Image: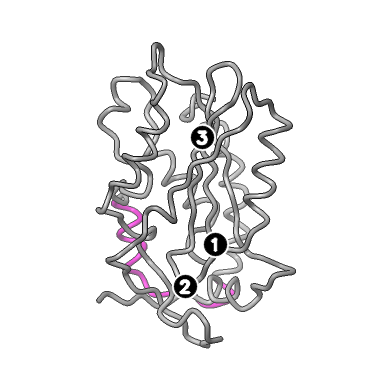
Amino acid sequence: MTTTRLNPLDTAWLFTESRATPNHVGGLLQFRLPAKAPRDFLRAMVAEFRAHRDVVAPWNQRLKLPFLKNPLPSWVEDDDIDMEYHVRHAALPWPGGERELGELVGRLHSTPIDLARPPWECTIIEGLGDDRFALFIKMHHSLIDGISGIKMLERAMATTARASLKLPPFFAAPPSRSSRAASKRPAPSVANAAAAAIEGLSTQARSLPQLASAFGS
């Protein structure tokens, strides 16, 4: 079983976690249904997502000792992930609008992440008007930071309908070469990690227009 030590910054997100201050982040992505999509298109998507067993890092990682305030926490690979738990299906009363979607996402985001499992959830939401549906992805900040999350989702998004048939779900998309190389580097010090996080905010802001284009929303 592969074990990976958390760096100081990610450890801090765990140590400051509480019911009053949950440290998870979420992303809401909206899409249009394909032309002439069958009525069961989204149910089939849910079933396809749940059928995947080749979940890749970091989506297959859970804390080795989730209930202890371990000063040196580690990730371990989970080879028995309950995809029924991680991939969820929700429906709004049709035709749902932005208000109804926002209320649902607010409820989904308000519940804490289960740190005994790989700390992420994906909810496929149907019932939106104008032939739309949505994905709400929630993850703990210690597992994935905002910049990394954007890049991972970009790799799982297609720019054409034909290309989308060849892409796996985001949790099964293999990491890029730069991500693999970064995972082999030593963990940064607290000071360096904090500086990198601050510098990354500008990178994240610059990435948003490209991300919106990739999502086609």
Estimate how packed mark 3 is, as few (under 14), some (14 to 19) or many (20 or more) residues with alpha carbons within 10 Å.
Answer: some
Q: Earlier in the sequence, mark 3 or mark 1?
A: 1
Residue drawn at 39 percent across, 11 percent down: 36
Q: Which contiguous range is marked in magenta?
A: 177-192
- Which of the pair 48/12 is nearer the observer? 48
Q: Quadrant of residue 197?
A: bottom right
Counting other residues with Cα less than 10 Å from the Cα at mark 2, is it few (<14), some (14-19), or many (20 or more)? few
Q: Are the residues flagged by discs 3 and 2 in contact, CB closer than 8 Å?
A: no
Q: Amino acid at mark 3?
A: Leu
Q: Which mark is residue 140?
A: 1
Task: Tell me the kind of residue under disc 2.
Answer: Ala
- Is residue 99 toward the left or the right of residue 138 in the image? right
Residue 149 pos. (x, y %): 48, 50
Q: Give the CA distance from mark 3 to mark 1.
A: 20 Å
Q: Nearer the viewer, residue 57 or 175?
A: 57
SS at badge 1? strand
- Residue 57, position in %: x, y? 34, 59
Task: Name which residue lies at 34% across and 47% down.
Answer: 50
- The answer to which of marks 3 and 2 sits earlier in the sequence is 2
Residue pointed to by mark 2: 116
> What's under tag 1, amino acid-wise?
His
Which residue is denoted by mark 3 in the rendering?
211
Q: CA distance from mark 1 to mark 2?
A: 12 Å
Q: Is residue 68 toward the left or the right of residue 178 in the image? A: right
18 lies above or below 24: below
Q: Residue 178: which numbered mark, if any?
A: none
Whole-percent x and y of residue 115? 51, 70
Q: Is residue 181 magenta?
A: yes
**Nearest to viewer (mark 3 / mark 2):** 2
- In the picture provided, is 53 more to the left or to the right than 112? left
Q: Say which element carries label 3.
A: helix
